[in-house]
């Protein structure tokens, strides 16, 4: 990677073109099994050096606060900062296109073989693992300091409302989010003093 | 078919804007819509498609492409994917430009992060339970689920290996 004299400080370089963004995110998308974010950190911070680690963490936490798939949001932010809407479209399209085509090919295979016992059995095993991976992520996320407060009860309430009561998500969020945001706002000064 | 496409695009466009924390947090809502309300697939197919997406590389959100495909073919896949990705991306694009780069936004970002974090974790937990509950008929499947949860929580063991082990255990008839 050549040093670009126009790039920002802190040893980072800027992507040279929207097509470089497209190709870089395509490579990322194809490497990410069970989540692209860990691969993205390695590639964007260490390989391409488009971002420092601090900038990466910053962008990811912003993107998590917004709706939408986190890694797609990350691609939108990075692409958008460098080449505007063109960059955002190039990065996100690069990220999604190849895995999308691959997945549809798998789906066509699945529809042809969904009656074959080995295929259904394999998928049943994979789905038991997939459930475990989701719950493992939950346990990791639950370690966040943001959940070390009574406001974690809003999470329990959201879980119960969706999982047990099977209420529509829009209704659940319409009730819980204002309460949760209000509580976080009310607790803001004390938390700021603690940290 | 046009009906299905318009329902898909509307449903997923709304979910796109509700999916704080990513696609996994709206998985139960997709299940409610596709399986319980519209009956376009069974719970088993829903779980199978989710597993297929997990076993394939790429962002997890692409599971919606498979749900769209199962509901309305290739057109469904394209419509569902665009509907799920475009609204949140447009919002992120403008939010990144205006809100997040503005001075003074940090306080509100912290408040929002603090407010959203517990809710996001609760919703993702509901997704985990949903996917796990498709396997309750097999005694050892919940054991495998719990084992994988602990492994991915406590170790850096690559998810792909666990997925391969799960497929092998399924073929061998263990789960």
Image (cartoon, coloured by chain):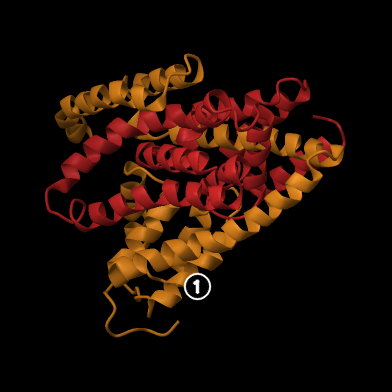
Q: Residue at x 17, y 41 (%)?
A: B107
Query: Which residue of the protein is positioned furthest toward the left in this rendering?
Result: B104
Q: Quadrant of the C terminus of chain B?
A: top right
Q: Where residue A97 sits: x, y (%)?
A: 53, 62
Residue B79 image offset from top left, x and y in percent: 48, 50
Front in this rendered view, residue A82 or B94? B94
Asked if residue A26 can be seen in this view, the reply is yes
Chain that is red in the image: B
Q: Residue at x 77, y 24 (%)?
A: B140
The total of numbered circles placed on residues is: 1
Q: In the rendered view, would you say A81 is above or below B47? A: below
Which image quadrant for residue A185?
Answer: top left
Front residue of A172/A61: it is: A172
Residue most toward the top? A165
The quarter of the image holding the N terminus of chain B is: top right
- The image position of residue B26, as x and y in percent, is 46, 34
Q: Is residue A148 visible?
A: no
> Who's the residue at 45% across and 42% down the image?
B6
Which residue in the structure is indicated by mark 1? Answer: A23
Position of residue B18 relative to residue A151, above or below, is below
Question: As drawn, is B165 to the left or to the right of A179?
Answer: right
Question: Chain A, which colour?
Answer: orange
Which chain contains the residue that carries disc 1? A
Query: Which of A107 and A59 lies nearest the eye of the viewer?
Result: A107
Instruction: Point out residue A113 in the picture as x, y percentages from the top left corner.
Output: 81, 45
**Could you tell whether A188 is left or right of B89 in the image?**
left
């Amino acid at each position: 990677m050549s040093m670009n004299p126009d790039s920002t400080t802190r040893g980072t370089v800027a992507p040279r073109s929207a097509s470089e963004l497209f190709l870089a995110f395509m490579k990322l998308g194809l490497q990410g099994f069970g989540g692209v974010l860990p691969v993205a950190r390695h590639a964007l911070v260490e390989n391409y050096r488009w971002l420092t680690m601090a900038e990466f963490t910053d962008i990811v936490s912003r993107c998590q606060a917004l709706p939408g798939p986190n890694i797609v949001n990350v691609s939108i932010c990075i692409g958008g900062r460098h080449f505007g809407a063109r960059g955002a479209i190039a990065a996100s399209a690069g990220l999604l296109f190849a895995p999308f085509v691959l997945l549809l090919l798998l789906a066509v295979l699945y529809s042809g073989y969904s009656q074959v016992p080995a295929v259904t059995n394999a998928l049943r095993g994979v789905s038991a693992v997939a459930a475990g991976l989701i719950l493992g992520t939950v346990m990791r996320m639950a370690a966040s300091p943001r959940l070390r407060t009574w406001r974690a009860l809003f999470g329990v309430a959201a879980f119960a409302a969706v999982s047990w009561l099977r209420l529509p998500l829009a209704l659940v969020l319409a009730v819980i989010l204002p309460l949760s945001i209000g509580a976080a706002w009310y607790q803001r000064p004390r938390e700021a003093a603690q940290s | 078919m046009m009906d299905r496409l318009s329902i898909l695009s509307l449903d997923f466009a709304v979910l796109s804007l509700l999916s704080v924390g990513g696609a996994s947090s709206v998985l139960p809502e997709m299940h409610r819509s596709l399986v319980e309300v519209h009956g376009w697939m069974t719970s088993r197919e829903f779980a199978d498609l989710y597993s297929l997406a997990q076993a394939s590389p790429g962002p997890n959100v692409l599971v919606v492409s498979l749900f769209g495909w199962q509901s309305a073919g290739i057109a469904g896949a394209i419509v569902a994917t665009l509907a799920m990705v475009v609204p949140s991306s447009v919002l992120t694009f403008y939010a990144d430009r205006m809100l997040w780069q503005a001075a003074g936004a940090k306080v509100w970002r912290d408040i929002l992060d603090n407010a959203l974090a517990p809710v996001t974790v609760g919703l993702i937990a509901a997704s985990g339970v949903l996917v796990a509950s498709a396997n309750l008929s097999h005694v050892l499947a919940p054991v495998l689920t719990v084992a994988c949860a602990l492994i991915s929580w406590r170790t850096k063991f690559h998810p792909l290996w666990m997925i391969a082990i799960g497929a092998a255990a399924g073929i061998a008839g263990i789960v």
